Image (cartoon, grey):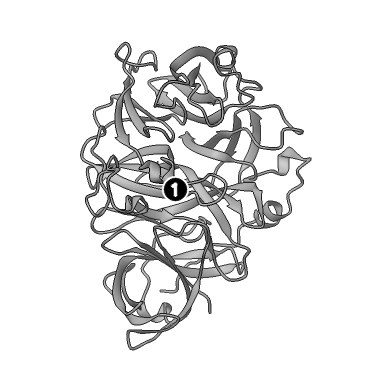
């Protein structure tokens, strides 16, 4: 049966040639710290206010879509920092909103902060509708200058027993998780600040934030996604997992996310995306602050990313998540374009490919390399090696890198090549120490 490739996305011209004076055409432009939520037939993304302060007031942005590809900029949920949050922080804008529905109520969490300080707070808005109006329910948790926690970047999750939790935190002592009262959306226990579940050595300035937890019922695991390093240059996303929502969260090597005594702090966590550049592209930097959509057991990574030519321009990206046989998430090297799951046969992957190896300690931009996948199960080009097709969309690649054999296992899929504007086949894989490999066929 012939492969069914996705159609050409109609959003490309708008995305690359946006008119910043026409908010209706913004689409994915300006969506920072995107948090996704599905309500009935629509997908919604709530995000941090855009940098174009001359165009709109500081606000929580809202977008909606029916297909995860074409996004309509709806407008602002609120047009200024709520008074109680402003009085505590004197913040100019609102950061990292997230929506969750509990029973028949919509909770919208947001944060306000003094940039680079721990004078911060997480606030709560409530509504009977995803479209508002939103009632201000005050402060959920706050931190002060003297605190070693930072009350920003709220992430909300209902665990498999239906209990409501909030993960939060940035830099300093890292990420915490706190149980909330389902009826109020606020801490279940008085004066409870939660439990630390992730942090980083201050040899790297403690750079960790943007936590997001999702549960996979097939593997019966909770997965913690976090962003490492600088928002403006080498942001990258790492993931660990746990049997319990309260941790401990570990990576593929069994290293706990609270371990700050490792020899190289860049080796903690499975890195699933960082700065990259395929041919015919200026490249992208700082993918991060993600959310995850579980849409009937189809998973998607939702994150912002910056154009390497202009670091002030950032966009919403959505990528399919695949799962290894060992229960680890890996992501597509190309943005989602409506591709469907289908079997990839050996004859369909032969030819010229670009690959990118997502090294854990190289996060600004990694350039692609060229290889040829041959019919005799060999690989030639910038790297030599072997490949084998296991079943359906499963592939194993053995590459000789610096006189050492590296083995990557993962998935294949049809996809849209956004760099060359044509359909293609992609590979996403990971090795046994948490280094990811991306690939796409180019001929």
- Compared with residue 220, is residue 377 higher up or lower down, i.e. above or below? below
Q: Image quadrant of residue 29?
A: top right
x and y, in percent, of residue 158 in the image: 32, 29
Q: Residue at x 61, y 44 (%)?
A: 71
Q: Residue at x 59, y 61 (%)?
A: 283
> Relative to the observer, which residue lies in front, 349 or 364?
364
Mark 1 crowd level (few <14, some 14–19, many ≥20, 10 Å Cα)? many
User: For the N terminus, which image quadrant?
Assistant: bottom left
Left or right, residue 227 beside residue 75: left
x and y, in percent, of residue 167 in the image: 37, 30
> Relative to the observer, which residue lies in front, 182 or 165?
165
- Compared with residue 342, is residue 182 higher up or lower down, i.e. above or below? above
**Which residue corresponds to mark 1?**
301
x and y, in percent, of residue 159 in the image: 28, 31
Task: Describe the element under mark 1 as helix, strand or loop.
Answer: strand
x and y, in percent, of residue 120 in the image: 50, 22
> Relative to the observer, which residue lies in front, 264 or 108?
264
Q: Is residue 295 visible?
A: no
Q: Residue at x 55, y 51 (%)?
A: 233
Q: Residue at x 66, y 22 (%)?
A: 79
Q: Image quadrant of residue 383?
A: bottom left
Left or right, residue 220 beside residue 193: left
């Amino acid at each position: 049966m012939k492969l069914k490739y996705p159609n050409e996305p109609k959003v490309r011209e708008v995305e690359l040639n946006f008119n910043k004076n026409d908010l209706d055409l913004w689409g994915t432009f300006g969506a920072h710290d995107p948090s996704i939520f599905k309500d009935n037939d629509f997908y919604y993304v709530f995000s941090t206010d855009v940098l174009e302060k001359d165009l709109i007031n500081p606000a929580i942005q809202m977008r909606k879509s029916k297909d995860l590809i074409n996004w309509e900029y709806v407008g602002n949920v609120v047009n200024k920092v709520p008074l109680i949050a402003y009085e505590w922080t004197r913040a100019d804008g609102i950061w990292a909103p997230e929506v969750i529905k509990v029973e028949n109520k919509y909770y919208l969490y947001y944060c306000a902060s003094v940039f680079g300080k721990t004078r911060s707070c997480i606030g709560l808005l409530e509504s009977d509708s995803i479209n508002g109006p939103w009632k201000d329910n005050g402060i959920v948790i706050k931190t002060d200058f003297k605190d070693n926690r930072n009350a920003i970047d709220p992430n909300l999750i209902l665990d498999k027993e239906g209990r409501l939790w909030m993960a939060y935190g940035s830099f300093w002592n890292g990420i915490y998780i706190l149980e909330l009262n389902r009826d109020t959306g606020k801490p279940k226990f008085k004066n409870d600040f939660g439990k630390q579940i992730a942090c980083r050595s201050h040899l790297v300035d403690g750079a960790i934030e943007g936590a997001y937890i999702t549960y996979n019922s097939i593997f019966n695991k909770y997965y913690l996604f976090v962003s490492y390093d600088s928002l403006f240059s080498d942001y990258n996303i790492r993931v660990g997992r746990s049997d319990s929502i309260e941790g401990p969260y570990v990576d593929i090597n069994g290293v706990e996310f609270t371990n700050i005594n490792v020899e190289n702090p860049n080796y903690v966590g499975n890195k699933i995306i960082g700065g990259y550049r395929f041919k015919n592209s200026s490249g992208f930097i700082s993918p991060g602050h993600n959310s995850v959509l579980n849409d009937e057991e189809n998973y998607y990574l939702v994150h912002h990313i910056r154009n390497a030519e202009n670091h002030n321009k950032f966009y919403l990206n959505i990528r399919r998540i695949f799962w290894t046989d060992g229960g680890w998430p890996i992501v597509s090297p190309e943005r989602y374009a409506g591709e469907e799951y289908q079997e990839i046969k050996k004859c369909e992957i032969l030819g010229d490919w670009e690959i990118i190896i997502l090294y854990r300690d190289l996060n600004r931009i990694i350039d692609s390399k060229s290889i040829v996948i041959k019919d005799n199960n060999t690989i030639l080009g910038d790297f030599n090696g072997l490949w084998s097709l296991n079943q359906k969309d499963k592939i194993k690649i053995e590459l000789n890198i610096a006189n050492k054999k590296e083995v990557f296992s993962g998935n294949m899929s049809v996809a849209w090549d956004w760099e060359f504007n044509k359909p293609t086949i992609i590979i996403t894989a990971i090795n046994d120490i948490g280094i990811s490999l991306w690939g796409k066929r180019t001929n």
